[in-house]
Image (tube, rainbow, N blue to C red):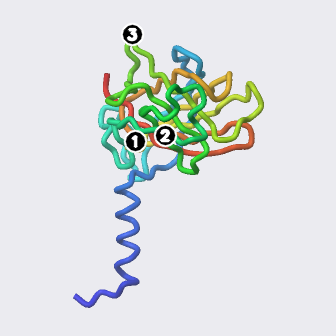
């Protein structure tokens, strides 16, 4: 007993980071082409623990992700085109609050790998409009393994199909024009 706070704090911080699934960057990407409006590259990499990547070990219940999205009214700035405007829909609000990802289903709306006859549809609605046609660039990282994938929605924010290579919690860094934001999305096993 009698350990000082300065000795305990680094251990707690390291444990919290490992629990949250923080991972290191990826290795050289190999191109793939998913169905829909996005382009892709994927690369597995070792996570912060130094253990090899394994898509099979990923689960959508990773910290920060959920597979059930209770429908609730959208933020007022994202309601254009919805009638009634306050109708509940399943969505995820980005960290900075600059974009919502509308998911269209409240349970397992996104699956990996993709399934024939079912799209991984996401409607991206930005708080501030960018010039028409400004592409949405997505860098996705599977939080449990560090696997990365990039996607580009060439038509800009709006409707898209975003397929990712493995189930689990994906951390998405979003860039469109000079805007940048982040959100987490879970892809259930198909």
- Residue 57: quadrant of the picture: top left
Residue at mark 1 to residue at mark 2: CA–CA distance: 8 Å
For marks 1 and 3, the one nearer the N-term is 3
Residue 65: horizontal and vertical position, in percent?
38, 43
Nearest to viewer (mark 1 / mark 3): 3
Q: Residue at x 44, y 37 (%)?
A: 185
Residue 58 visible from this viewpoint: no
Quarter location, residue 157: top right
**72 and 146: which one is in front?**
72
Q: Residue at label 3? A: 116
- Disc 1 on helix, strand or loop? loop
Around disc 1, counting alpha carbons within 10 Å, would you say few (fewer than 14), some (14 to 19), or many (20 or more)? many
Q: Please give the label number shown on residue 141.
A: 2
Foreground disc of the pair 3, 2: 3
Seen at 69% across and 36% down, the residue is 176
Residue 50: image location, x then y, percent: 40, 50
């Amino acid at each position: 007993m009698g350990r000082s706070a300065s000795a305990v704090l680094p251990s707690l911080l390291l444990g919290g980071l490992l629990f949250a699934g923080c991972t290191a960057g990826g290795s050289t990407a190999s191109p793939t082409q998913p169905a829909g409006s996005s382009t892709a590259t994927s690369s597995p990499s070792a996570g912060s623990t130094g253990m090899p990547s394994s898509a099979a070990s990923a689960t959508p219940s990773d910290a920060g992700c959920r597979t059930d999205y209770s429908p609730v009214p959208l933020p007022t700035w994202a309601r254009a085109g919805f009638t009634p405007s306050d109708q509940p829909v399943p969505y995820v609000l980005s960290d900075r609050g600059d974009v919502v990802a509308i998911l269209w289903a409240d349970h397992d709306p996104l699956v990996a790998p993709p399934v024939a006859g079912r799209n991984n549809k996401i409607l991206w609605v930005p708080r501030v409009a960018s010039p028409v046609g400004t592409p949405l660039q997505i860098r996705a990282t599977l939080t449990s393994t560090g696997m990365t994938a990039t996607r580009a929605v060439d038509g800009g924010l709006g409707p898209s199909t975003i397929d990712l290579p493995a189930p689990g919690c994906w951390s998405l860094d979003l860039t469109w024009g000079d805007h940048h934001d982040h959100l987490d999305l879970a892809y259930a096993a198909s």
